[in-house]
Image: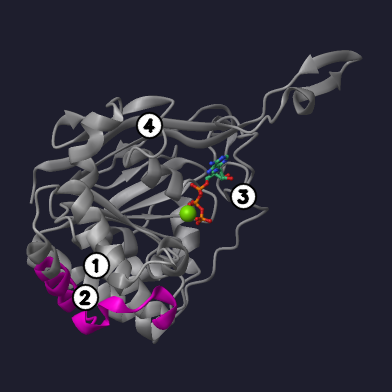
Amino acid sequence: MNDNLLTVNNLVKRFDISGGFLEQLAFENGKLIRKHTIVRALNDVSFTISSGETFSVVGESGCGKSTLARTILGLYPPESGEIYYSKKRIDNLSSNKMLPYRSKMQMIFQDPYASLNPRKTVHQTLEEPILFHKKSISKKEVREKISEVMMQVGIDPLWGRRYPHEFSGGQRQRISIARALMVDPEFIVADEPVSALDVSIQAQILNLLMDAQKERGLTYMFITHDLSVVEHISTRVAVMYLGVLCELAPAKELFTSPKHPYTQALLSAIPRVGEQRSGHIKLRGEVPTPINLPSGCVFSARCPYASEICKKEKPQLKNVGNNHFISCFL
Ligand SMILES: Nc1ncnc2c1ncn2[C@@H]1O[C@H](COP(=O)(O)OP(=O)(O)OP(=O)(O)O)[C@@H](O)[C@H]1O
Ligand SMILES: [Mg+2]
């Protein structure tokens, strides 16, 4: 369990949303200038994921979770920083050299309706990745693999000729998971895999993911905006705010003694049965846009404890003991 499967060092990702030349022109102090508008989606993100772990990334909408997932999987080129998979650097590989990693690293998306091709049957959807990655495989082996994986995710293999619209949301997400499992991956990035589902179905899908992990020794990066989902399934949790990791700790530690003011506020918002509420921490203001990031700590504008230093300097992620990291001057 303890060897590093994925290492991310100082990852930075920006999007230039300036538009065309005419859209970039603006008047400032009576002069015509050309303005660039940059979204700072990931700002110096570093962490490692050990083999066999369920590493969760939580944060509000727009904080950069999906961008992090896509950059790790090579779907977006990073601005700077390094990504290592099994000690091999992968962020600068050509698409050909990236191919073997594409089958080891798979992604499950939030909306199983949008991520499944409506014109393809379940069978066609499931055979596609394996035919692409294992060119020499026989038709019989493909059929056997499809049956095995469909049974594992709890979909009757006889339904292989049906189309996505003939399934419920929960069943469609099972098919998405089956598609990811077809190529025997090691590492799965699940981007909000249960957010679109009913609460009762959420638990079933989470159980399915956990069972698949046990049977296949999978490593997960689990992305969600819902802290209550990750408490029981994660080994470690990273809390993200405006493209920065504010806190990273073993799951139990994070839920029992959160240290960053943002994590404390997020946790205080989760309703719990049978527990005296020690007071809901209300945050001031709204999440600033990642276009004009505040200088200093990205959370300082909303932090109830912010002091002068927080507005001027950027805190670094530091170990405060027990593998508990926070980026905060407090
Ligand atoms: N392709 C893109 N082009 C321009 N900006 C983008 C692009 N993708 C993401 N962004 C911006 O980067 C920021 C982070 O977006 P991202 O989708 O990673 O957030 P998220 O945490 O996944 O949010 P959600 O919980 O809503 O899925 C947002 O401000 C978003 O507008
Ligand atoms: Mg997202």
How far apart are the two marked residues, 3 and 2, measured between alpha carbons? Answer: 38 Å
Residue position marked by numbered label 1 in the rendering: 178
Asked whether disc 4 touches disc 2, contact meaning CB atoms under 8 Å apart, the reply is no
Q: Residue lying at the far right in this picture: please name it.
A: 30
Task: Indicate left or right for 232 with 146 as reference.
Answer: right
Camera-nearest residue between 183 and 120:
120
Residue type marked 3: Val
* Discs 1/3, front: 1
Precedes in sequence: disc 2 or disc 1: 2
From the image, state whether disc 3 or disc 2 is nearer to you. 2
Label 3 element class: loop
Label 4: element kind: strand
| Residue at numbered disc 2 | 153
Circle 1 residues within 10 Å: few <14, some 14–19, many ≥20: many
> Label 4 amino acid?
Leu
Q: Secondary structure at mark 2?
A: loop
Q: Nearer the viewer, mark 4 or mark 3?
A: 4
Secondary element at image label 1? helix
The three-letter amino acid code for the residue at tag 2 is Val
Q: Which residues are magenta?
A: 144-168
